[in-house]
Image (cartoon, rainbow, N blue to C red):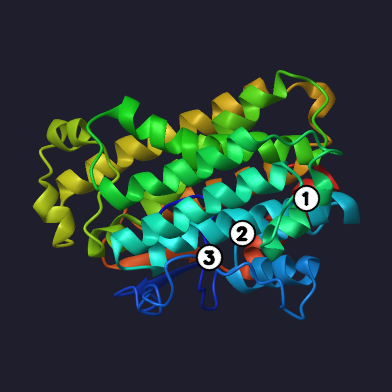
Amino acid sequence: MARICNDADRPQPGCATREGAFSALPKGNGTIGAVPKPHLALPVKPEDYVQQKAVASGSSFYYAFLFLSPERRAAITAFYAFCREVDDVVDEVHEPNVAAAKLAWWQREVHQTFAGRPSHPVMRALSPHIAPYGLTEAPLQAVIEGCRMDLTQTRYLDEAALSRYCHLVAGVVGEVAARIFGQTDPATTAYAHTLGQALQRTNILRDVGEDALRGRIYLPIDHLQRFDVKAQEILQRQHSDRFAALMRFEAERAHALYDEALAQLPAADRRAQKPGLMMASIYRDLLRAIEREGFRVLDQRIALTPLRKFWLAWKMQALGRM
């Protein structure tokens, strides 16, 4: 799935890697239980649960979190784990009615958390950080709503429709992250939202083939029509010059969003927002790797190695350069 919090890579040696036939599709039959259990009796501490969730995901976000203070790292790790939990409902539960019930449970759990009654270990880990970082309920509910769209929608008519989806599953995620990272200037919100959209667009381009196996196409219908690419060609993973031209157009849009985000970041917040800039560096490097591969994403997954991602994160932290 292309959502921003589902970006786990499964790399092999080398800078950019390719995974044929998407061997690591969602596991499990997703039929056990209609709602997540509160986990009140789990022996693991909430903070350990979310840390394990973040590390096990293999996400690029992990590298950006490494350089945060312990308090901020704990907060963003808990928030990231929440995003992963609701994201996994869509990708790992095969029955739409069961998935919808689980997402409804999460909606109630988020509401109860902001009322001071968290039960799931993820929300118990996040709860202590709500007041210190001024977190509100609406963005978390928006993330759930974005995931809910994936239960009923497999196509997007135009740029506006795709932007709405990206707003829910990525833009608001960026806004919450910016607050946790230490936002001081209100203008940073626009930067964070635009950056989230850029990261999401990169995810979408990387996962076109993998999403096609699930019957989903996130590239807007009017964009496909513009380049004379049929949906069936993507679903059957048929690469063509027309598809490459479409992808080049989409990549240029993603690059423009990165440039726009960087221009929106106030100088006063640049230091605090380094984790987001690390993500921009890692994801833009991934976008360039996709371009170098000629946009052959229909039958392989292009990824950066952990070493490459760590290097890019360190370079931003130490040198302030992408």
Quadrant the N terminus occupies: bottom left
Image quadrant of residue 146? top left
The residue lying at 35 percent from left, 44 percent from top is: 149
Horizontal arrangement in the rendering, residue 66 relative to residue 57 (left or right)? right
Q: List the residue tagged with mark 3.
A: 8
Q: Is residue 99 left or right of residue 62?
A: left
Element type at mark 1:
helix
Q: Nearer the viewer, residue 142 or 160?
A: 142
Of circles 2 and 1, the one toward us is 1
Nearer mark to the viewer, of 3 and 1: 1
Element at badge 2?
A: loop
Q: Quadrant of the C terminus?
A: top right
Left or right placement of residue 78 versus residue 212 in this view: right
181 on left or right of 168? right
Tell me the distance, in whole angstroms, between the alpha carbons under discs 2 and 1. 24 Å
Which residue is identified by label 1? 127
Q: Position of residue 119 (x, y in %)?
A: 69, 60
Q: Residue at x 30, y 59 (%)?
A: 96
User: To which residue does mark 2 refer?
Assistant: 60
Amino acid beneath label 2: Ser
Where residue 195 sits, quadrant-wise, is: top right
Image-quadrant location for residue 102: bottom left
Q: Amino acid at mark 3?
A: Ala
Q: Indicate which disc, 3 or 2, sits on the residue closer to the N terminus.
A: 3
Q: Earlier in the sequence, mark 3 or mark 1?
A: 3
Q: Amino acid at mark 1?
A: Ser
Q: Earlier in the sequence, mark 2 or mark 1?
A: 2
Name the residue nearer the viewer: 90 or 33: 33
In depth, the one of 114 and 293 nearer the eye is 114
**Could you tell me which residue is drawn at 89 percent across and 52 percent down?**
71
